Amino acid sequence: VAATLPTYKRISGVTFIKDPLPRTRLGKIQRHLVLSMTQSTKTAVEPAPEQESETDQDIRQTTTGEAVIGSLVGLVSADRTLRLDDHLDLDLGFDSLKRVEFQAALESRLGSIPETFMGEVVTVRDVITKLMALQQIPTEHTETTTSWHQIFETPLSPALTKTVLAPLSLGNKIIGQIGMAIIGSFSRIAFPLTVRGLKHLPKEGPFILAANHLSFIDPFMILGTVPRSMFTQLYTLGWEPFFRSPFRRWIARVGHVIPVGPATPLAIVLKTSVALLRNGKSLLIFPEGERSLDGELLPFKKGLGVLACELNVPIIPVKIQGSFEVWPPDSKTPHFHPIILTFGESLRITPSMIETWTTNDEDPHVVASQLVRDAVASL
């Protein structure tokens, strides 16, 4: 069944816990404590080696099979025995970012692969057989290491480049400025909105605003609060299914929203972000990757760490308080409640920090994301 679903709908793991789930006094599940419980109960138990059939040995020894296994070697632990029936997520522990790295490693050996390819495979065997079906012609077989820098150097498609980087007309610029000014003024009156730390915002980009996510009104609060001169260069990623009608697509363009869908390959999302930042634009992102269902701060995704480490741009932590009470996920109408929006001091991930983390056998992208999360939590 998993092969027929987009990656974001697939089960990535199952953990059984005997103890009751921790809850607040109101009975809501404390998701951050549940996460720590699941992490503490995980044990990596590798199944006992089995003798491969002659057919599987033949598949492994094909040029494509050797290229796939060779690409996996640098992405899994050194003592991991790779099997053709290994599940990429459940057995090898791949997340969306690891799939991007895997595809890039495959392309360095086998040439171009469709961007949707990694969303169509589940096991190592799937990868090999589907590549064979695509009739990929291997290039010279070398032990190639593909970095995020190399991935980001791959250009966007012409259509996406036009969508992301095409300048707005003067009329749309004016409409966008007026619209955000109205949102900012309305927010201060209706909720009311208190803004702190605007002095920490850089005078010019590129930079990243990394905010927690409590309600669908969060991006409007932030975009409507920053100085008007900054808004002209500030973009955010939005829920593509919401922006499918012509009018809403126009709203997205005027409001500096780049629509991305749940099935959009992560490589495209990251490369779009990189294209914006490298062209002097700034980016508002919500590193939790979803709205909090209970108001608690969720773990930050690794993608923020990738951008922070690879681009070395300033990151401004942003904390939103009160928007969960204004419009919680289970409510159809907003409620009156004060909102506090706090901008913290900027962070920058330096090469020396990355070197230290690497020396300590830590994943720099994970540590960088956690560093920003801690900064948001402390505001």
Image (cartoon, rainbow, N blue to C red):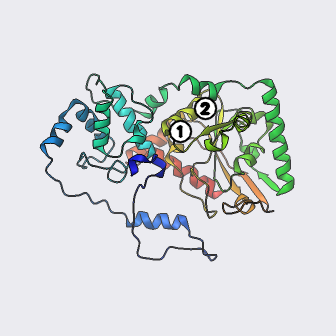
The residue indicated by pointer 2 is 277
Looking at the picture, tell me which residue is in the foreground, 207 or 9: 9
Tell me whether the residue at label 2 lies in contact with that at label 1, contact meaning CB atoms closer than 8 angstroms: yes
Amino acid type at circle 2 is Leu
Amino acid type at circle 1 is Leu
In the visual, does 142 lie left or right of 323? left
The image shows residue 285 at horizontal and vertical percentages of 62, 44
Answer with the quarter of the image where residue 179 lies.
Answer: top right
The image shows residue 73 at horizontal and vertical percentages of 28, 40
The image shows residue 120 at horizontal and vertical percentages of 40, 41
Q: Residue 170 has which mark?
A: none
SS class, disc 1? helix
- Quarter of the figure with the C terminus: bottom right
The residue that appears at 23% across and 48% down in the rendered structure is 81
First along the sequence among labels 2 and 1:
2
The residue that appears at 82% across and 46% down in the rendered structure is 184
Looking at the picture, tell me which residue is in the foreground, 125 or 218: 125
In the visual, does 183 lie left or right of 311? right
The residue indicated by pointer 1 is 307
The image shows residue 364 at horizontal and vertical percentages of 45, 44
The residue that appears at 67% across and 54% down in the rendered structure is 319
Distance from disc 2 to disc 1, alpha carbons, whole Å, reads: 10 Å
Whether residue 150 is situated above or below residue 89 in the rendered picture = above
**Disc 1 crowd, CA 10 A, few/some/many (<14, 14-19, 20+):** many
The residue that appears at 62% across and 55% down in the rendered structure is 291
Looking at the picture, tell me which residue is in the foreground, 153 or 290: 290
SS class, disc 2? helix
Whether residue 111 is situated above or below residue 293 in the rendered picture = above
Answer with the quarter of the image where residue 110 lies.
Answer: top left
